[in-house]
Amino acid sequence: MFAKFPVKALASRSRQFNSTGPNLNSIKQNFVVTILDGADKMGRNVALLLKQCPLISELRLYDRDKSICVIAEDLSHIDTNTKVTSYCGFGVLKHAVLDADLILSVGGCRQKAHECARHLFEKNVDNVRSAALHCIAFNPRAIFCVSNPPIEAFVPLVSEEYKKAGVYDARKIIGISSIGCMRANYYVSLISGQDPSNVRCPIVGGISKNCLVACVSQSRPDKVHPQHHKIIQDSIHIAEDEALKMHSEHGSECLSSALAVSRFVNTQLKALRGETNCVDCAFVRQTAHIGQFLPYMTTIVRLGRHGVLSAHMPKINGFEAHCLKRASMFIRENICLGESFVTGEQKKGKSAITKN
Protein backbone atom coordinates (compact mmCIF):
# COMPACT_ATOMS: atom_id res chain seq x y z
CA MET A 1 0.00 0.00 0.00
CA PHE A 2 2.90 2.35 0.74
CA ALA A 3 5.16 1.13 -2.05
CA LYS A 4 5.14 4.65 -3.55
CA PHE A 5 5.26 6.48 -0.22
CA PRO A 6 8.32 8.76 -0.06
CA VAL A 7 10.71 7.72 2.68
CA LYS A 8 13.78 9.82 1.86
CA ALA A 9 13.18 11.96 4.94
CA LEU A 10 13.41 8.86 7.07
CA ALA A 11 16.81 7.78 5.81
CA SER A 12 18.74 9.23 8.72
CA ARG A 13 16.81 7.07 11.17
CA SER A 14 16.73 3.92 9.04
CA ARG A 15 19.09 1.01 9.13
CA GLN A 16 21.57 0.83 6.29
CA PHE A 17 20.63 -1.39 3.37
CA ASN A 18 22.93 -3.36 1.11
CA SER A 19 23.58 -0.98 -1.77
CA THR A 20 24.09 -3.85 -4.19
CA GLY A 21 20.67 -5.31 -3.40
CA PRO A 22 19.80 -8.83 -2.26
CA ASN A 23 20.96 -11.96 -4.02
CA LEU A 24 17.54 -13.35 -4.94
CA ASN A 25 19.07 -16.67 -5.95
CA SER A 26 19.96 -17.33 -2.31
CA ILE A 27 16.64 -16.13 -0.88
CA LYS A 28 13.48 -18.15 -0.56
CA GLN A 29 11.03 -17.19 -3.31
CA ASN A 30 7.81 -18.98 -2.30
CA PHE A 31 6.24 -19.05 1.12
CA VAL A 32 3.80 -20.94 3.30
CA VAL A 33 1.05 -18.79 4.81
CA THR A 34 -1.39 -20.01 7.48
CA ILE A 35 -4.75 -18.31 8.00
CA LEU A 36 -6.27 -19.01 11.41
CA ASP A 37 -10.08 -19.01 11.64
CA GLY A 38 -10.25 -19.39 7.88
CA ALA A 39 -13.98 -20.24 7.90
CA ASP A 40 -14.79 -16.81 9.32
CA LYS A 41 -16.09 -14.25 6.78
CA MET A 42 -12.88 -12.31 7.08
CA GLY A 43 -10.81 -15.46 6.76
CA ARG A 44 -12.64 -16.61 3.63
CA ASN A 45 -12.23 -13.26 1.92
CA VAL A 46 -8.54 -13.02 2.78
CA ALA A 47 -8.00 -16.59 1.58
CA LEU A 48 -9.66 -15.82 -1.75
CA LEU A 49 -7.33 -12.87 -2.28
CA LEU A 50 -4.17 -14.64 -1.13
CA LYS A 51 -4.90 -17.65 -3.37
CA GLN A 52 -4.01 -15.27 -6.20
CA CYS A 53 -0.64 -14.26 -4.71
CA PRO A 54 2.23 -15.75 -6.76
CA LEU A 55 4.59 -15.57 -3.77
CA ILE A 56 2.60 -18.17 -1.81
CA SER A 57 3.36 -21.82 -2.56
CA GLU A 58 0.96 -23.17 0.07
CA LEU A 59 -2.01 -21.50 1.73
CA ARG A 60 -3.12 -23.29 4.89
CA LEU A 61 -6.61 -22.69 6.24
CA TYR A 62 -7.34 -23.61 9.85
CA ASP A 63 -10.66 -23.59 11.67
CA ARG A 64 -12.58 -25.71 14.15
CA ASP A 65 -15.61 -25.57 11.86
CA LYS A 66 -15.83 -28.44 9.36
CA SER A 67 -16.81 -26.00 6.61
CA ILE A 68 -13.12 -25.13 6.31
CA CYS A 69 -12.65 -28.29 4.23
CA VAL A 70 -15.34 -27.17 1.77
CA ILE A 71 -13.83 -23.68 1.56
CA ALA A 72 -10.36 -25.06 0.85
CA GLU A 73 -11.70 -27.42 -1.83
CA ASP A 74 -13.56 -24.57 -3.50
CA LEU A 75 -10.50 -22.30 -3.46
CA SER A 76 -8.32 -25.06 -4.88
CA HIS A 77 -10.31 -24.83 -8.14
CA ILE A 78 -8.89 -21.35 -8.79
CA ASP A 79 -6.27 -21.71 -11.52
CA THR A 80 -3.18 -20.47 -9.68
CA ASN A 81 -0.12 -22.38 -8.46
CA THR A 82 -0.87 -21.78 -4.79
CA LYS A 83 -1.76 -25.05 -3.07
CA VAL A 84 -4.64 -24.81 -0.57
CA THR A 85 -4.69 -27.15 2.44
CA SER A 86 -7.37 -27.34 5.14
CA TYR A 87 -6.84 -28.13 8.82
CA CYS A 88 -9.99 -28.81 10.82
CA GLY A 89 -10.17 -29.18 14.60
CA PHE A 90 -8.13 -27.96 17.55
CA GLY A 91 -5.98 -31.09 17.51
CA VAL A 92 -4.38 -30.20 14.16
CA LEU A 93 -3.63 -26.55 14.90
CA LYS A 94 0.01 -27.40 15.55
CA HIS A 95 0.29 -28.93 12.08
CA ALA A 96 -1.27 -25.82 10.53
CA VAL A 97 1.38 -23.51 12.00
CA LEU A 98 4.40 -25.84 11.75
CA ASP A 99 7.05 -24.50 9.33
CA ALA A 100 4.80 -21.68 8.07
CA ASP A 101 6.61 -18.47 7.13
CA LEU A 102 3.73 -16.18 8.05
CA ILE A 103 0.81 -16.90 10.38
CA LEU A 104 -2.24 -14.69 10.10
CA SER A 105 -4.84 -14.47 12.87
CA VAL A 106 -7.93 -12.96 11.26
CA GLY A 107 -11.08 -14.39 12.81
CA GLY A 108 -13.12 -13.66 15.87
CA CYS A 109 -16.03 -11.35 16.53
CA ARG A 110 -16.17 -7.95 14.86
CA GLN A 111 -16.87 -4.90 16.97
CA LYS A 112 -20.50 -3.80 17.22
CA ALA A 113 -21.79 -0.26 17.53
CA HIS A 114 -21.35 1.12 21.07
CA GLU A 115 -19.47 -2.02 22.16
CA CYS A 116 -16.56 -1.32 24.50
CA ALA A 117 -13.09 -2.66 23.77
CA ARG A 118 -13.04 -4.78 26.93
CA HIS A 119 -16.17 -6.69 25.91
CA LEU A 120 -14.77 -7.28 22.42
CA PHE A 121 -11.46 -8.39 23.92
CA GLU A 122 -13.18 -10.92 26.15
CA LYS A 123 -15.00 -12.45 23.17
CA ASN A 124 -11.85 -12.87 21.07
CA VAL A 125 -9.09 -13.46 23.60
CA ASP A 126 -9.32 -17.26 23.78
CA ASN A 127 -8.77 -17.70 20.04
CA VAL A 128 -5.88 -15.25 19.85
CA ARG A 129 -4.11 -16.59 22.93
CA SER A 130 -4.51 -20.20 21.78
CA ALA A 131 -3.02 -19.29 18.40
CA ALA A 132 -0.11 -17.50 20.07
CA LEU A 133 0.66 -20.43 22.38
CA HIS A 134 0.69 -22.88 19.47
CA CYS A 135 2.99 -20.63 17.47
CA ILE A 136 5.31 -20.34 20.47
CA ALA A 137 5.41 -24.11 20.88
CA PHE A 138 5.69 -25.20 17.25
CA ASN A 139 6.89 -22.24 15.15
CA PRO A 140 8.21 -19.27 17.16
CA ARG A 141 10.29 -17.99 14.23
CA ALA A 142 7.28 -17.32 11.99
CA ILE A 143 5.99 -13.81 11.49
CA PHE A 144 2.76 -13.53 13.48
CA CYS A 145 0.27 -11.00 12.08
CA VAL A 146 -2.78 -10.01 14.11
CA SER A 147 -5.95 -8.46 12.71
CA ASN A 148 -8.36 -9.54 15.45
CA PRO A 149 -9.97 -6.55 17.17
CA PRO A 150 -8.97 -4.87 19.38
CA ILE A 151 -5.50 -5.03 17.81
CA GLU A 152 -4.18 -2.53 20.36
CA ALA A 153 -4.77 -5.13 23.08
CA PHE A 154 -3.87 -8.33 21.23
CA VAL A 155 -0.43 -7.32 19.95
CA PRO A 156 0.72 -6.65 23.56
CA LEU A 157 -0.96 -9.88 24.73
CA VAL A 158 0.83 -11.97 22.10
CA SER A 159 4.09 -10.18 22.87
CA GLU A 160 3.81 -10.96 26.58
CA GLU A 161 3.16 -14.64 25.85
CA TYR A 162 6.29 -14.75 23.66
CA LYS A 163 8.30 -12.98 26.38
CA LYS A 164 7.04 -15.44 28.97
CA ALA A 165 8.23 -18.33 26.81
CA GLY A 166 11.61 -16.72 26.16
CA VAL A 167 11.19 -16.54 22.37
CA TYR A 168 10.16 -12.90 21.95
CA ASP A 169 11.24 -11.04 18.82
CA ALA A 170 9.40 -7.72 18.47
CA ARG A 171 10.07 -7.66 14.73
CA LYS A 172 7.86 -10.68 14.15
CA ILE A 173 4.66 -9.64 15.96
CA ILE A 174 2.68 -7.20 13.83
CA GLY A 175 -0.77 -5.68 14.15
CA ILE A 176 -2.23 -5.04 10.70
CA SER A 177 -3.71 -1.54 10.46
CA SER A 178 -3.85 -1.20 6.66
CA ILE A 179 -7.62 -0.63 6.60
CA GLY A 180 -6.99 2.69 8.34
CA CYS A 181 -4.54 3.72 5.62
CA MET A 182 -7.01 2.65 2.95
CA ARG A 183 -9.78 4.81 4.42
CA ALA A 184 -7.42 7.74 4.88
CA ASN A 185 -6.31 7.50 1.25
CA TYR A 186 -9.92 7.42 0.11
CA TYR A 187 -11.03 10.51 2.03
CA VAL A 188 -7.92 12.48 1.11
CA SER A 189 -8.61 11.71 -2.56
CA LEU A 190 -12.28 12.63 -2.12
CA ILE A 191 -11.44 16.05 -0.71
CA SER A 192 -8.55 16.80 -3.06
CA GLY A 193 -10.01 15.32 -6.25
CA GLN A 194 -7.07 12.98 -6.80
CA ASP A 195 -6.94 9.38 -7.97
CA PRO A 196 -7.15 7.39 -4.69
CA SER A 197 -4.71 4.80 -6.04
CA ASN A 198 -2.04 7.51 -6.17
CA VAL A 199 -2.63 8.88 -2.65
CA ARG A 200 -0.50 7.83 0.31
CA CYS A 201 -1.66 9.03 3.72
CA PRO A 202 0.10 7.51 6.77
CA ILE A 203 -1.69 6.87 10.04
CA VAL A 204 -0.45 6.78 13.63
CA GLY A 205 -1.87 5.80 17.01
CA GLY A 206 -4.01 2.71 16.66
CA ILE A 207 -6.67 1.27 14.40
CA SER A 208 -9.77 1.04 16.59
CA LYS A 209 -12.33 3.78 16.95
CA ASN A 210 -10.93 6.77 18.88
CA CYS A 211 -7.36 5.50 18.37
CA LEU A 212 -6.60 6.22 14.71
CA VAL A 213 -5.00 9.50 13.66
CA ALA A 214 -4.56 10.21 9.95
CA CYS A 215 -1.44 12.27 9.19
CA VAL A 216 -3.07 14.27 6.41
CA SER A 217 -0.30 16.86 6.62
CA GLN A 218 2.11 14.18 5.39
CA SER A 219 -0.10 12.77 2.63
CA ARG A 220 1.37 12.57 -0.84
CA PRO A 221 0.72 14.22 -3.21
CA ASP A 222 0.34 17.15 -0.81
CA LYS A 223 -2.77 18.83 -2.22
CA VAL A 224 -4.99 19.08 0.86
CA HIS A 225 -5.61 22.51 2.36
CA PRO A 226 -5.01 22.60 6.15
CA GLN A 227 -8.62 23.63 6.75
CA HIS A 228 -9.69 20.22 5.41
CA HIS A 229 -7.54 18.16 7.79
CA LYS A 230 -10.19 18.01 10.50
CA ILE A 231 -12.89 17.17 7.95
CA ILE A 232 -10.88 14.16 6.77
CA GLN A 233 -10.14 13.00 10.31
CA ASP A 234 -13.82 13.24 11.23
CA SER A 235 -14.83 11.45 8.02
CA ILE A 236 -12.63 8.47 8.87
CA HIS A 237 -14.20 8.19 12.32
CA ILE A 238 -17.70 8.53 10.86
CA ALA A 239 -16.86 5.79 8.35
CA GLU A 240 -15.89 3.54 11.24
CA ASP A 241 -19.14 4.37 13.03
CA GLU A 242 -21.16 3.61 9.90
CA ALA A 243 -19.32 0.34 9.37
CA LEU A 244 -20.02 -0.73 12.96
CA LYS A 245 -23.68 0.28 12.63
CA MET A 246 -24.14 -1.71 9.42
CA HIS A 247 -22.41 -4.69 10.99
CA SER A 248 -24.76 -4.55 13.97
CA GLU A 249 -27.88 -4.29 11.79
CA HIS A 250 -27.04 -6.39 8.74
CA GLY A 251 -23.81 -8.24 9.41
CA SER A 252 -20.51 -7.47 7.70
CA GLU A 253 -18.88 -8.90 4.59
CA CYS A 254 -15.43 -7.58 5.60
CA LEU A 255 -14.51 -6.91 1.96
CA SER A 256 -12.41 -3.76 2.32
CA SER A 257 -10.79 -5.07 5.51
CA ALA A 258 -9.88 -8.33 3.77
CA LEU A 259 -8.29 -6.46 0.87
CA ALA A 260 -6.31 -4.31 3.30
CA VAL A 261 -5.02 -7.40 5.14
CA SER A 262 -4.09 -9.18 1.90
CA ARG A 263 -2.19 -6.11 0.70
CA PHE A 264 -0.16 -6.05 3.90
CA VAL A 265 0.61 -9.77 3.63
CA ASN A 266 1.74 -9.28 0.04
CA THR A 267 4.03 -6.45 1.12
CA GLN A 268 5.53 -8.55 3.92
CA LEU A 269 6.10 -11.49 1.57
CA LYS A 270 7.91 -9.21 -0.87
CA ALA A 271 10.12 -8.15 2.02
CA LEU A 272 10.75 -11.78 2.91
CA ARG A 273 12.04 -12.45 -0.60
CA GLY A 274 14.49 -9.57 -0.34
CA GLU A 275 12.78 -6.50 -1.78
CA THR A 276 13.81 -3.37 0.11
CA ASN A 277 11.12 -0.77 -0.64
CA CYS A 278 8.44 -2.48 1.46
CA VAL A 279 6.73 0.22 3.51
CA ASP A 280 3.33 0.26 5.22
CA CYS A 281 1.75 1.29 8.51
CA ALA A 282 1.37 -1.23 11.33
CA PHE A 283 0.77 -1.45 15.08
CA VAL A 284 4.11 -2.61 16.49
CA ARG A 285 6.45 -2.36 19.46
CA GLN A 286 8.09 1.07 19.71
CA THR A 287 11.50 2.02 21.09
CA ALA A 288 13.50 5.18 21.88
CA HIS A 289 11.51 8.40 22.45
CA ILE A 290 8.38 7.04 20.74
CA GLY A 291 8.43 4.04 23.06
CA GLN A 292 8.48 6.40 26.03
CA PHE A 293 5.24 7.94 24.79
CA LEU A 294 3.52 4.64 23.91
CA PRO A 295 5.18 1.19 24.07
CA TYR A 296 3.03 0.01 21.16
CA MET A 297 1.69 2.23 18.43
CA THR A 298 0.82 2.41 14.75
CA THR A 299 3.60 4.10 12.78
CA ILE A 300 5.20 3.83 9.36
CA VAL A 301 7.23 0.61 9.19
CA ARG A 302 9.84 -0.75 6.84
CA LEU A 303 9.45 -4.49 6.44
CA GLY A 304 12.35 -6.88 5.99
CA ARG A 305 13.26 -10.56 5.95
CA HIS A 306 12.61 -10.89 9.68
CA GLY A 307 9.46 -8.78 9.92
CA VAL A 308 9.67 -5.13 10.98
CA LEU A 309 13.03 -3.71 9.95
CA SER A 310 12.43 -0.24 11.40
CA ALA A 311 9.60 1.99 12.58
CA HIS A 312 9.27 5.71 11.88
CA MET A 313 7.08 8.42 13.34
CA PRO A 314 6.05 10.87 10.60
CA LYS A 315 6.03 14.60 11.27
CA ILE A 316 2.63 15.76 12.49
CA ASN A 317 1.07 19.19 12.82
CA GLY A 318 -0.55 20.69 15.91
CA PHE A 319 -4.03 19.35 15.18
CA GLU A 320 -2.72 15.82 14.60
CA ALA A 321 -0.63 16.02 17.77
CA HIS A 322 -3.77 16.98 19.71
CA CYS A 323 -5.66 14.02 18.21
CA LEU A 324 -2.81 11.64 19.04
CA LYS A 325 -2.62 12.84 22.63
CA ARG A 326 -6.34 12.22 23.01
CA ALA A 327 -6.08 8.80 21.34
CA SER A 328 -3.13 7.78 23.52
CA MET A 329 -5.41 7.40 26.55
CA PHE A 330 -7.44 4.71 24.78
CA ILE A 331 -4.38 3.05 23.27
CA ARG A 332 -2.59 2.88 26.62
CA GLU A 333 -5.61 1.29 28.30
CA ASN A 334 -5.89 -1.30 25.53
CA ILE A 335 -2.20 -2.11 25.88
CA CYS A 336 -2.67 -2.55 29.63
CA LEU A 337 -5.67 -4.80 29.00
CA GLY A 338 -3.64 -7.14 26.80
CA GLU A 339 -0.52 -7.21 28.93
CA SER A 340 -2.34 -7.68 32.24
CA PHE A 341 -4.21 -10.70 30.87
CA VAL A 342 -0.85 -12.50 30.73
CA THR A 343 1.08 -10.88 33.57
CA GLY A 344 -1.82 -10.48 35.99
CA GLU A 345 -0.73 -6.92 36.78
CA GLN A 346 -3.56 -4.37 36.78
CA LYS A 347 -3.03 -0.62 36.85
CA LYS A 348 -5.22 1.35 39.19
CA GLY A 349 -7.53 4.04 37.94
CA LYS A 350 -10.60 4.41 35.80
CA SER A 351 -10.29 2.67 32.46
CA ALA A 352 -10.81 4.64 29.28
CA ILE A 353 -11.70 1.60 27.19
CA THR A 354 -15.19 1.45 28.61
CA LYS A 355 -15.84 4.53 26.48
CA ASN A 356 -14.15 3.13 23.39
Image (cartoon, helix red, strand yellow):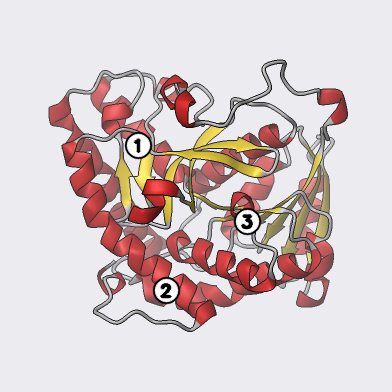
Residue sitting at x 81%, y 24% = 24
Local crowd at mark 2 within 10 Å, few (<14), some, or many (≥20)?
Answer: many
**Residue that mark 2 sits on:** 337
**Residue that mark 3 sits on:** 43
Quarter of the picture holding the C terminus? bottom left
Residue sitting at x 29%, y 19% = 222
Q: Amino acid at mark 1?
A: Ala
Q: Is residue 168 above or below residue 45?
A: below
Q: Secondary structure at mark 1?
A: helix
Between residues 312 and 337, which one lies in front from this camera angle? 312
Q: Secondary structure at mark 2?
A: helix
Residue 82, percent across and down?
Answer: 82, 40
- Choose the circle earlier in sequence order: 3 or 1: 3
Q: Amino acid at mark 3?
A: Gly
User: Which is in the foreground here, disc 1 or disc 2?
Assistant: 2
Between residues 338 and 220, which one lies in front from this camera angle? 338
